[in-house]
């Protein structure tokens, strides 16, 4: 997949990626002198020229690619709503203007219905492709959405012609959002990203794309980057949050070990005589350890339960900043509790074990 992006990345980028990986190619048509009606004509020429490159499977365009640019949100209304005040809106919807074949080029499955064509323009009836979440929330189900209508803020009725798979639109950690895709010819943008999917060698494809765009207009500014590289900006907050949480977790574990060890050492020091008497009277080491570790183990149990409850309460915050965070996963919870319990028992066992190595007579003399 190839996307052409303008004035954001260097044309001389070092491409090191796998076959069939996405690239972004962005053009800035207005900076090249294109105005109004000239813009959609040039966009269509670019798509047709890129599609003619040997090995290219699909080419599409989008005004604002998801994640990297986020999304424009518009209110939509059910078809039977007559009062179009914002308070009566059914929901805010992420809105994208795309060309025919965008979904195939971007790798977004079209689950039902049809894709856009170049006949879906200002002279035709208004149509849209919506995602599954839109279909479920507004129409009840994807099957009921095809062929039905909804309204925009200006009262325009839009017919649903296709259902696309749900995706991520603003952040990777977001909940399911409603999204609609409108024909690009209805609102042509002066800056456009083109997506090209091909089955040929990526290095050769990059050169062919450059030559093709320059052949159409040598003065047209554009850049080419990997789709994966574009996602780095979307992944950055989650990665930093993960690193920060990891560092804080390691520091918390170290503080826990220090605190538990200190508590156990102090507890043992206060019970030196009692332990010495127990050993002198013939108590087994196992019985002495049980008597000494019992209180510490109870404290560990109470602390683990409290930490588990607080962790569950913080899951909403965690899942909002860390991509694919699953804090309610039983394996994760069990692993954390077991790990901290083992650390606590080890930190408690060390000072107690040290006492058992001493002579009972020495213990009895200790104050």
Image (tube, helix red, strand yellow):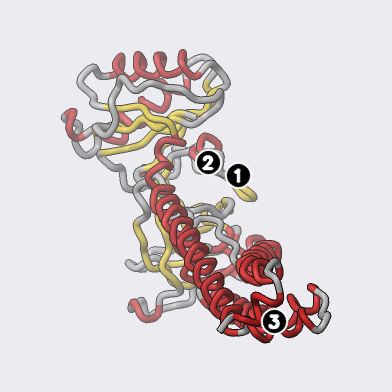
Which image quadrant is residue 65 in? Answer: top left
Considering only vertical position in the picture, is 148 above or below 5? below
Residue 135 is left or right of residue 357, and the answer is left
Q: Name the residue that disc number 3 marks.
A: 275
Q: Is residue 169 visible?
A: no
Compute the Cα span from label 3 to label 2: 74 Å
Q: Which mark is residue 145?
A: none
Considering only vertical position in the picture, is 108 above or below 309? above
State which tag comes first along the sequence, 3 or 2.
2
184 or 358: nearer the viewer:
358
Q: Secondary structure at mark 2?
A: helix
Q: Which mark is residue 103?
A: 2
User: Dot 2: few (<14), some (14–19), or many (≥20) neighbours within 10 Å?
Assistant: many
Q: Name the residue that disc number 1 marks.
A: 109
Q: Quadrant of the C terminus?
A: bottom right
User: Dot 3: few (<14), some (14–19), or many (≥20) neighbours within 10 Å?
Assistant: many
130 or 267: nearer the viewer:
267
User: Dot 1: few (<14), some (14–19), or many (≥20) neighbours within 10 Å?
Assistant: few
Residue 88 is left or right of residue 256, and the answer is left
């Amino acid at each position: 997949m190839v996307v052409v992006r303008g004035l954001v990345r260097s044309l001389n980028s070092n491409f090191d990626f796998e076959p069939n990986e996405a690239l972004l190619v962005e053009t800035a048509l207005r900076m090249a002198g294109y105005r109004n009606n000239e813009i959609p004509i040039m966009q269509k020429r670019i798509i047709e020229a890129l599609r003619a490159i040997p090995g290219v499977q699909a080419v599409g365009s989008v005004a604002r690619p998801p994640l990297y640019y986020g999304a424009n949100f518009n209110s939509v209304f059910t078809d039977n709503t007559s009062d179009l005040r914002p308070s009566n809106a059914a929901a805010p919807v992420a809105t994208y203007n795309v060309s025919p074949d965008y979904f195939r080029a971007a790798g977004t499955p079209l689950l039902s219905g049809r894709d856009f064509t170049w006949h879906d323009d200002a002279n035709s009836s208004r149509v849209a492709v919506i995602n599954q979440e839109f279909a479920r929330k507004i129409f009840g189900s994807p099957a009921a959405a095809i062929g039905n209508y909804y309204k925009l803020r200006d009262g325009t009725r839009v017919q649903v012609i296709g259902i696309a798979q749900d995706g991520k639109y603003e952040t990777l950690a977001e909940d399911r959002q409603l999204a609609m895709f409108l024909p690009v010819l209805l609102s042509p943008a002066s800056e456009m990203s083109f997506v090209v999917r091909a089955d040929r060698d990526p290095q050769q494809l990059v050169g062919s794309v450059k030559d093709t765009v320059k052949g159409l207009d040598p003065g047209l500014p554009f850049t080419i980057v990997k789709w994966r590289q574009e996602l780095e900006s979307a992944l950055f907050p989650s990665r930093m949050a993960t690193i920060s949480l990891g560092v804080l977790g390691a520091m918390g574990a170290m503080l826990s070990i220090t605190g538990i060890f200190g508590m156990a050492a102090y507890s043992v020091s206060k019970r030196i005589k009692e332990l010495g008497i127990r050993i002198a009277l013939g108590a087994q080491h196992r019985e002495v350890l049980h008597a000494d570790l019992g209180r510490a183990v109870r404290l560990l149990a109470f602390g683990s339960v409290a930490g588990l409850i607080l962790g569950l309460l913080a899951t909403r915050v965690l899942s909002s900043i860390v991509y694919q965070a699953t804090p309610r996963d039983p394996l994760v919870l069990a692993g954390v509790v077991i790990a901290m319990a083992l650390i606590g028992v080890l930190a408690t066992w060390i000072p107690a074990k040290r006492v058992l190595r001493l002579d009972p007579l020495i213990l009895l003399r200790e104050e």
